[in-house]
Image: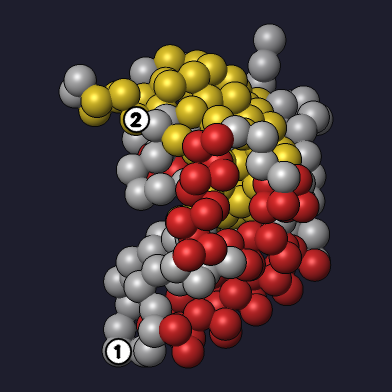
Amino acid sequence: MTAPAGTPEAASGPALEVEGLWKSFGSLHVLRGIDLALADHDVVCLIGSSGSGKSTLLRCINLLDTIDAGRIVLKGADITARGVDVNTLRRRIGIVFQSFNLFPLSGGQQQRVAIVRALAMSPDLLLLDEITSALDPELVADVLDVIRELAYGGMTMLIATHEMGFARDIASRVCFLDHGVILEQGTPAEMFSEPREARTRQFLQRIIEAGRL
């Protein structure tokens, strides 16, 4: 029997396992059977068009959105099981969003503070949701440098990002989401140089044409 999240009896294993995850909002199927695993110290970047399901996946992992089917396992503990202490769980999974609610600091400083706040409880996993999208271009590099330092320090991270150059440099694995499924995944070299799927190639070609890769 799997121990509840947040208890010392939780079994060891991969840092995160997502199995058969479905999430709908009304008749809209946002996530359609997502399977994903992260080992300790992995940095996995989620890429894809807006509306592909990246943010919803992160919100489901943090239990901010209730899943419809599947399960999420953190360090061997099924955190979607009945009776899980959500508050205890959220001390183990830090999350930083694209919009920030701190003021009157600058955007870049606010995001650095938000990252520090998410790290305050020494989480097992850090989720980052497009955290540079609301920043002025000159501030993006500062925030990405903070994330790069965390990666080099061994923090396990799942990052939804439109910063393709950053994903290419920092990720141990890149996952391309399209219409609620992980259509393709691989190393940055595989994904950005030799993508297998036509839809992935189309997406990346548009990124290249926009000068973002």
- At numbered mark 1, what does the secondary structure look like: helix, strand or loop? loop
Q: Say which of 203 and 44 sits in front.
A: 203
Residue linked to disc 1: 104
Q: Residues within 10 Å of mark 2 (few under 14, many from 20)?
A: many
**Figure check: 177 above or below 94:** above
Q: Amino acid at mark 1?
A: Pro
Q: CA distance from mark 1 to mark 2?
A: 35 Å
Mark 1 or mark 2: name the one nearer the start of the chain. 2
Q: Say which of 101 and 199 sits in front.
A: 199
Q: Quadrant of residue 59?
A: top left
Question: Residue at 57% across / 84% down in the picture?
Answer: 142
Question: Residue at 50% across / 37% down in the picture?
Answer: 199
Quarter the N terminus occupies: top right
Residue linked to disc 2: 30
Q: Residues within 10 Å of mark 1 (few under 14, many from 20)?
A: few
Q: Which mark is residue 204?
A: none
Quarter the C terminus occupies: bottom right
